[in-house]
């Protein structure tokens, strides 16, 4: 059973920063790519960033230069550092573990709201 627990969401003003964490259970973590996705009301879930088991990263164009994904295999945790936040970044952020190149296991989500 794979369990993912996100934390670190909240309310922040435009231009501010937040750091999300996703703690994963199970020995699969160190060998699995993982990613952060987000879903805003009325919109489709979209990829924010993902990271391979070896640390190679990939970002959506909308967050390049502002967000940074990282992982700590010793702690079974991935992070998303979000800087220069914009109102359009408001969404529920979910972490996922990939299986065969596809996000398969999901966390419950963390609300991020960017508003003045």
Image: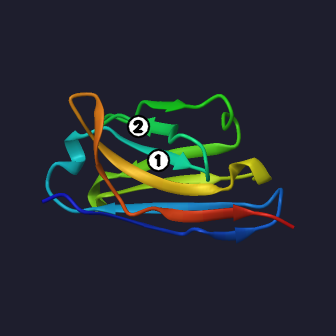
Alpha carbons under labels 1 and 2: distance apart: 7 Å
Residue 38, above or below 3: above
Residue occupying the point 45% across, 62% down: 109
Q: Secondary structure at mark 1?
A: strand
Q: Which mark is residue 35?
A: none
Residue drawn at 20 percent across, 40 percent down: 31
Q: Is residue 84 visible?
A: no
- Residue 99's x, y, as percent? 21, 36
Q: Earlier in the sequence, mark 1 or mark 2?
A: 2
Task: Name the residue carrying label 2.
Answer: 51
Whether residue 1 is visible here, answered yes or no, is yes
Q: Secondary structure at mark 2?
A: strand
Disc 2 crowd, CA 10 A, few/some/many (<14, 14-19, 20+): many
In this rendering, would 58 be left or right of 88? left
Task: Count every numbered label the image shows and give the total.
Answer: 2
Which of 76/97 is in front? Answer: 97
C-beta proximity under 8 Å, tags 1 and 2: yes
Instruction: Decide: few, some or many residues near mark 1? Use Cα within 10 Å; few <14, some 14-19, many ≥20.
Output: many
Say which quarter of the image contains residue 60.
Answer: top right
The spot of residue 30 in percent (x, y) is 23, 46
Quadrant holding the C terminus: bottom right
- Viewer-nearest residue: 19 or 105: 105
Q: Position of residue 111 (x, y in %)?
A: 57, 65
In this rendering, would 116 be left or right of 17?
A: right
* 116 to the left or right of 73: right
Q: Is residue 101 above or below residue 110?
A: above
Residue receiving disc 1:
70
Q: Nearer the viewer, residue 67 or 101?
A: 101
Look at the image and tell me in which quarter the N terminus lies: bottom left
Q: Describe residue 84's horizontal placement relative to residue 116 as left or right.
A: left
Q: Given the current orientation, which residue lies at the most extreme front position?
A: 42
């Amino acid at each position: 059973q794979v369990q993912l627990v996100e934390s670190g969401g909240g309310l922040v003003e435009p231009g501010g920063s937040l750091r999300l964490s996703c703690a994963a259970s199970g020995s699969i973590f160190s060998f699995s790519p993982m990613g952060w996705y987000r879903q805003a009301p009325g919109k489709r879930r979209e990829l924010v960033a993902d990271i391979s088991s070896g640390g190679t990263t990939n970002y959506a164009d909308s967050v390049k230069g502002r967000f940074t994904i990282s992982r700590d295999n010793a702690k079974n945790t991935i992070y998303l550092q979000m800087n220069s936040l914009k109102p359009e970044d408001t969404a529920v952020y979910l972490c996922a573990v990939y299986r065969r190149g596809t996000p398969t296991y999901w966390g419950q989500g963390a609300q991020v709201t960017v508003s003045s």
